[in-house]
Image (tube, rainbow, N blue to C red):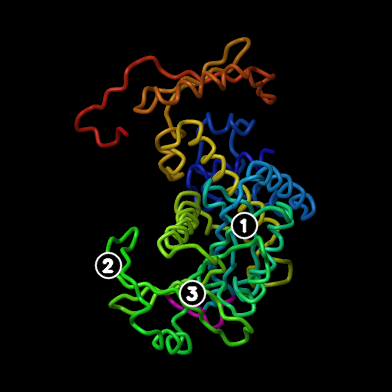
């Protein structure tokens, strides 16, 4: 539990390397973890290396089931699937040079995230070596998601060109209640078929977001290795073709383009995980008797799960504050609501946290009142009830003070 709470602080404070914990001396953060001081880097690394694979798998399964229970019944469920690659420096190939990274092998870990685009939540994730790409495991991912939600759940899967493979399209066309949209590659064979489309089949089309006037045609494209052709929404611009492959039969071009734009939310989530929650900074270890630094898969999974857990938790927090705040970035949440100065007062029956005045304090007040009514005890402080107090003073911005948020 203490390791879990320390890793939450690492993510919320945007600490990139775990040894930076040695520099933190904040008493409030220490009290949050149930200790007089935060765990140091050596203790965190040791505890990470002792995590059992089956224990972590069980914990992650419970987390996924809780998310699935909230999303079940939403028909159709729009799910974005995407790949994120995290590099790291490996074994030194040549002699040591002045540049630290020169001569080393850059390895990488591929993360596959499954994201509910409509409600902005991470459903699950997986990771493997970078030699495995999305096109190789796309069908397994879709089958896994169908097993989580049940065969009656209707899906719309959105993925980019990383999942482009004729074998994938052929099998997806056979799934009745599964729909997909993905961009088409401008290969020489595809362009040859699209160039043969007569001009009278194109219609004028106003792009729903860019607002520019382009041409659109609905056609069929035959891919090598496929017995059936695939429905294609083809946009023709001055720069060339931009097509979408789909198994929607009646969906119009404008609706399909708007639908595919939901996939951009997973790219935004990667930006938040990488920049605000430091996803790319992962634990490593050295096995005894080896010189090369190797990744510990269980430790990587646990740290990644903690950061994904915080991502979803901040989305839930934003939903409690209002629909407008659900799309707010994690870094903005932390700056506006979480990383706030204050003071701790211990009473005989409660532990009271008094927050200093800040701009959004009135917005937080109803949430704090609901939290205080639950009277949550803190086990490591003699079960004192935790109380949050929002200042009654009006927030005033000091003119010329650029450090004041």
Relative image position of residue 162 (x, y in whole percent)? 54, 72
Secondary structure mostly seen in magenta is loop
For disc 2, the marked residue is 213
Q: Which mark is residue 155?
A: 1
Q: Residue farthest to the right?
A: 54
For disc 3, the marked residue is 232
Q: Is residue 318 above or below residue 181?
A: above
Marked residue nearer the N-terminal end (3 or 2): 2
Q: Which residues are magenta?
A: 91-103
Q: Residue farthest to the left?
A: 400
Q: Is residue 32 above or below residue 184?
A: above
Marked residue nearer the N-terminal end (2 or 1): 1
Q: Quadrant of residue 337?
A: top left
Magenta-span inclusion, residue 362: no
Q: Is residue 166 left or right of residue 194?
A: right
Q: Is residue 153 above or below residue 389?
A: below
Q: Is residue 222 left or right of residue 394?
A: right
Residue at 60 percent of width and 14 percent of height: 350
């Amino acid at each position: 539990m203490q390791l879990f709470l320390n890793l939450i602080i690492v993510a919320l404070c945007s600490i990139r390397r775990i040894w930076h914990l040695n520099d933190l001396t904040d008493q409030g953060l220490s009290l949050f973890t149930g200790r007089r001081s935060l765990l140091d880097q050596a203790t965190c690394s040791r505890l990470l290396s002792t995590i059992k694979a089956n224990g972590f798998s069980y914990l992650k399964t419970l987390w996924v089931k809780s998310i699935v229970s909230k999303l079940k019944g939403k028909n159709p469920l729009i799910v974005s699937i995407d790949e994120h690659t995290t590099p790291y420096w490996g074994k030194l190939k040549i002699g040591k040079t002045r540049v630290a990274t020169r001569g080393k092998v850059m390895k990488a870990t591929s993360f596959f995230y499954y994201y509910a685009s409509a409600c902005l939540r991470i459903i699950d994730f997986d990771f493997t070596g970078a030699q495995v790409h999305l096109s190789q495991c796309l069908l397994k991912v879709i089958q896994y998601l169908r097993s989580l939600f049940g065969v009656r759940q209707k899906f719309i899967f959105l993925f980019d060109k990383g999942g482009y493979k004729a074998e994938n399209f052929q099998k997806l066309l056979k799934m009745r209640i599964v729909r997909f949209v993905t961009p088409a590659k401008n290969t020489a064979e595809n362009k040859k078929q699209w160039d043969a489309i007569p001009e009278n089949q194109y219609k004028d089309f106003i792009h729903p977001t860019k607002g520019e006037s382009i041409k659109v045609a609905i056609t069929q494209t035959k891919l090598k290795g496929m017995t059936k052709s695939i429905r294609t929404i083809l946009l023709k611009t001055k720069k060339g073709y931009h097509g979408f492959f789909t198994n929607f039969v009646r969906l119009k071009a404008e609706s399909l383009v708007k639908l595919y734009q939901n996939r951009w939310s997973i790219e935004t989530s990667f930006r938040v995980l990488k920049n605000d929650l430091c996803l790319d900074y992962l634990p490593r270890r050295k096995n005894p008797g080896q010189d090369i630094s190797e990744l510990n898969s269980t430790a990587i999974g646990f740290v990644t799960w903690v950061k994904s857990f915080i991502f979803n938790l901040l989305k839930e927090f934003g939903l409690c504050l209002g629909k407008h705040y659900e799309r707010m970035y994690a870094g903005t949440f932390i700056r506006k609501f979480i990383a706030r100065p204050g003071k701790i007062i211990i009473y005989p029956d409660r532990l009271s946290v008094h927050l200093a005045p800040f701009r959004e304090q009135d917005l937080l007040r109803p949430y704090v009142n609901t939290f205080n009514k639950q009277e949550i005890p803190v086990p490591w402080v003699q079960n004192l009830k935790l109380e949050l107090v929002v200042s009654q003073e009006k927030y005033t911005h000091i003119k010329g003070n650029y450090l004041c948020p």
